[in-house]
Image (tube, grey):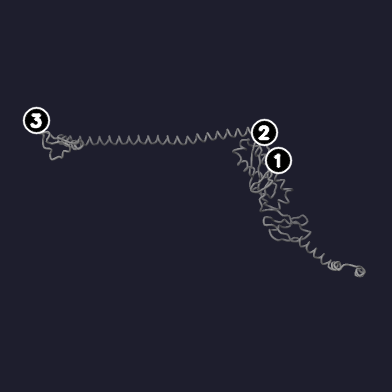
Amino acid sequence: MAQDNFSGMNVPPQLKSLSKNIRYIILAVLVFVVGFATFFTVDPEEVGIITRFGEFTRTAQPGLNFKVPFVEEVRYVPVERQLKHEFGYRTTQAGVRSSYQKAGYTDESLMLTGDLNLADVEWVVQYRVSDPFDFLFKIRNPEQTLRDISESAMREIVGDRTVNEVLTVGRAEVAAEAQNLIQKICDEYESGLRIEQVVLQDINPPDPVKPSFNAVNEAQQQKETLINQAKSEYNKVIPRARGQAQETIQKAEGYSVDRVNRARGEASRFNQLYREYVKAPEVTKRRIYLETLEDIIPKIGNKIVTDQNGNNVLPLLQMQMKGVNVNQPNSNANNQGN
């Protein structure tokens, strides 16, 4: 009957061909839709959590996977990607020169310290999803829950410290304690999250009191500088003085040892001479006399030997007289004789 209707009408040939192939087109569309709903791809840094009518069934690993169409649903969880939450600011553009926006996020970072001062604390929580099942099914809205946990933990830790500790020397300790406390609470909630790092980006006093805080910090830095300079000077002078004192003591001890040894040597030498003298006084006297002359005569330069009375000049025993006229005494004697 349909053919009769078409035959009685002026139907274009293209419409007739389409009407004949409509079932094939519909079948191809159904196959495409079923195939699209059956196969799916999981990225390398993700896992797929497959649920059947909302109930967890299995985990799909990276690569091509399949599921029962229209019955099973897949949810992707980035388990290999490092995620982060920013507090007190937001990154508007990331890159070599990143840009940030702080307006509108002061309520997150402004907190009270233990000494009843205000501090503007900006920080970042870096984390990973360690258990996809807990991340999806144990906590409702885990991202917002982590933000609330992080803000509560940071306020608790900052509230136990003075503003000077938070601004200066206590930054690393605050970050470490915040990481431990956030991880502890996440484990208690079975959130499936692993906190990898808490980074304190910037800590400043509120804008109205910032000049006063800067002046105090400059004074503290000058104080530390002067203390370090004094310690440096102390380390230079005191060891040098100690070394000089030790050197003087060692010299004195060495001089003392030398004097004592010399005195003992002289005493021993005198005792030995005395023993020899007692045995033969005349021989000892003569030997000492000769030894003394032997030591003194080479040191007195040119020498003239006379007799006991000094009247006549004795031969010089073939000693070479340098710079002395030997004939001059004879001429003087002749003149005296004349």
Name the amino acid type tagged 3: Asn
Mark 3 / mark 1, whichever is N-terminal: 1
Quarter containing the C terminus: top left
Looking at the rendered structure, the secondary structure element under dot 3 is helix
Q: Which mark is residue 142?
A: none
Q: Which mark is residue 103?
A: 1
Name the amino acid type tagged 2: Pro
20 shown above or below 222: below
Nearer the observer: mark 3 or 1; the answer is 3
Q: Which mark is residue 335?
A: 3
User: How packed is label 1: few (under 14 Cα within 10 Å), some, or many (20 or more)?
Assistant: few
Q: Which residue is mark 2?
A: 208
Closer to the camera in the image, 244 or 338: 338
Residue 131 percent coordinates (x, y): 68, 52
Residue 251 is left or right of residue 24, and the answer is: left
Residue 238 percent coordinates (x, y): 45, 35
Q: Are marks 3 and 1 in contact (CB under 8 Å)?
A: no
Name the amino acid type tagged 1: Ala
Tell me the distance, in whole angstroms, between the alpha carbons under discs 2 and 1: 16 Å
Residue 222 percent coordinates (x, y): 55, 34
Query: Residue at the location (69% across, 57% down)?
Result: 43
Choose top left, top right, bottom left or bottom right for residue 210. Answer: top right
User: Does residue 120 appear anywhere in the picture?
Assistant: yes
Nearer the observer: mark 3 or 2; the answer is 3
Residue 298 is left or right of residue 84, and the answer is: left
Mark 2 / mark 1, whichever is N-terminal: 1
Quarter containing the N terminus: bottom right
Closer to the camera in the image, 320 or 174: 320
